Amino acid sequence: MRYELLGPIQVIRRDDVHFISARKVEILLATLLAKRDQAVHRDQLIIEIWGDEPPRRASAALHVYVSQLRKFLGPEHDVGRQSSGKDMGPIITRPLGYMLRTLNDEIDVSDFEQLVSEGRAGSLRGDLEVAVDRLERALALWRSTSLLDLRAGPILDSYATWLEESRIECLETLIAAYLNMNKHREVVGRLYVLAGEYPMRENFLRYLMLALFRSDRRADALSVYREGRERLKNELGLEPCRSLQEMNYAILTGEESLLDMAC
């Protein structure tokens, strides 16, 4: 079985893709996946599903949702999975809650982490082609924003935040690899999109300025700095970070040593 969270949650079993139509059952699955192979207390699950205003019979309703999720996932008899009675299948009852046991199951988040790790390692040892390949493959696993509309409780909210930060870090590492391969023209368009999508992520502004400068677009690079600085001052009351200011200075003065060290 394969679980995919990097987009609308889906479960792939024997090459068939399955979706959960009931939102509360979907939240239950997402929470158990976020804490996979760990027991999650019933009270935590109730907060994830209903927030601070659970119904009077929330425990009974949770039991129903667990039963529905068990039916949806079905009994799996993978190698190494030992189950009996009511715990046949991946959801295991614990004294105070439930656990989703994965064992041999595949999870796209785990694949993403592995590819990012390989890409980062390739970048550190200077194997930029491997770095780009792994990081692009990692980003290709994302079908849309992860856990959209499901992150009401603390578990899913923190997990979704971690996933998004990991995706942005992957993007930053990928762009740096491209720039270090002197593929600056290839990333200009992508960087404009990223700078627009994440206007407060100054690293994307810095990379965009560098890519534009290397593409003989010095005026555009300086314009990116001016607009970014104005946005930061108007919205946060802050000056650009030191690295962004140094990039602006390097472009203004043609300081090659700073430009070479930019990535």
Image (cartoon, rainbow, N blue to C red):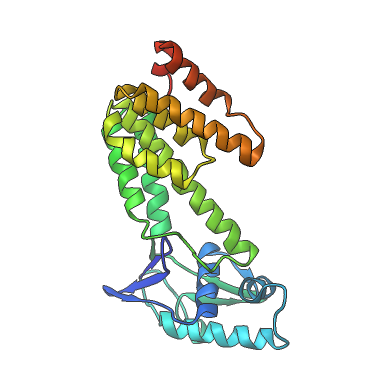
Name the quadrant containing residue 132.
Answer: top left
Against 246, residue 113 (above or below) is: below
Residue sitting at x 54%, y 22%: 245
| Residue 117 visible (yes or no) | no
| Residue 204 visible (yes or no) | yes
Name the quadrant containing residue 177.
Answer: top left
Q: How many marks?
A: 0
Against 28, residue 60 (above or below) is: below
Residue 56 on image: x %, y %: 73, 87
Residue 156 on image: x %, y %: 57, 63
Quarter of the picture containing the C terminus is top left
Question: Residue 138 or 190: which is nearer the viewer?
Answer: 190
Does 169 sit left or right of 43 as displayed? left
Residue sitting at x 62%, y 71%: 48
Does 17 sit left or right of 194 as displayed? left
Against 162, residue 127 (above or below) is: above
Residue 185 on image: x %, y %: 27, 31
Residue sitting at x 50%, y 42%: 199
Residue 164 on image: x %, y %: 49, 51
Residue sitting at x 41%, y 60%: 6
Quarter of the picture containing the N terminus is bottom left
Against 150, residue 74 (above or below) is: below
